[in-house]
Amino acid sequence: MKKMKKANVKAMICIAVMGLTVISCGQRVNTNVSLTTAVDSVCYAIGINYGNGLGSNMETFPGGPANVDALVAGFITAIKGDTGSLKIGVNDAQAFIQQYMMAQQAKESEATKAEGDAFLSANKSKEGVITTESGLQYKVITEGTGAKPTTGDKVKVHYTGKLLDGTVFDSSIQRGEPVTFPVTGVIPGWTEVLQIMPVGSKYQVWIPSELGYGAQGAGQMIKPNSTLDFEVELLEIVKE
């Protein structure tokens, strides 16, 4: 929600200050401004600062391309204080944005879940892929000969985590250092597969969203309802 609001503010400032020669409310936005005072200059600088790189952001506007004319019309009408001409009331605007964003997020989450389900359905019939009762899928790259961890153990692992499109969102290998954590201190899909793996094993693991970060997602890259693809190497069971 905060990001959506920020994106709109950027659009308003950029379009209002720098123009883009858009006709709105019967007036052409004036781009030939005089920077006579310090206030003039700082306002112009704010427009440049917010407008730089805005085009690509507006192209990815949630739900489709942004309607620049509507955005400018709302901005100019509101900044002039002509509330009687507003098509959405001032007190209703924030709620409208919130409702819109929630609806778009729900659509995106549903699409991400459907994409993951379709992938897992096709993936389970591929050679070497094993599907557990929970829906977790894995493929043995290297089968180790050591002990298998239990829920009371800590383990040291190397891993690379990817989205289904191949985007790497986290990798201990890229950082050059394995990580140590309790078997139960990670997402459910990890807790499950670690107890299947003997020490020395390397598996490719596909984790359904409900065994991963679920409807909340994680950070900027892992969207809600994302199915995740991990390569996990179990290096050792760490003894206290």
Image (cartoon, grey):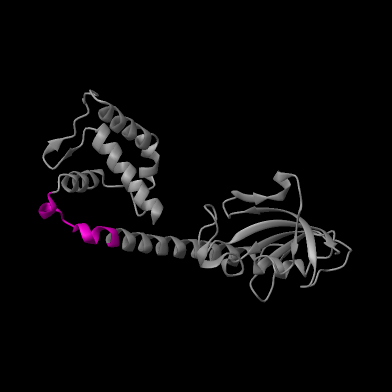
Q: Quadrant of the C terminus?
A: bottom right
Q: Residue at x 12, y 49 (%)?
A: 82
Which quarter of the rendering shows the N terminus? bottom left
> Foreground: 69 or 205?
69
Is 240 part of what is drawn in magenta? Answer: no
Q: Is residue 92 magenta?
A: yes
Q: Residue furthest bottom?
A: 133
- Compared across the picture, whether 218 is left or right of 182 comes to left
* 143 on left or right of 99: right
192 w.r.t. 81: above or below: below
Magenta span dominant secondary structure: helix
Task: Report x, y in % for residue 4.
Answer: 37, 52
The boundaries of the magenta stretch are 82-95
The vertical placement of 200 against 149, above or below, is above
Find the residue positioned furthest to the right: 145
Q: Residue at x 73, y 67 (%)?
A: 193
The residue drawn where x is 67% and y is 65% is 186
Residues 118 and 183: in front is: 183
Q: Quadrant of residue 53?
A: top left
> Which residue corresponds to the image point at 29% horizontal and 39% vertical from the top-left?
13
Picture coordinates of residue 166 (x, y %)? Answer: 60, 50
Vertical placement of residue 18 versus 85, above or below: above
**Residue 51 falls left or right of residue 143:** left
Count the labels in the image. 0
The image shows residue 182 at horizontal and vertical percentages of 74, 65
Find residue 181 and report its horizontal and vertical position in percent.
Answer: 74, 61
From the viewer's perspective, tell me whether residue 122 is left or right of residue 171. Answer: left
Foreground residue among 157 and 50:
50
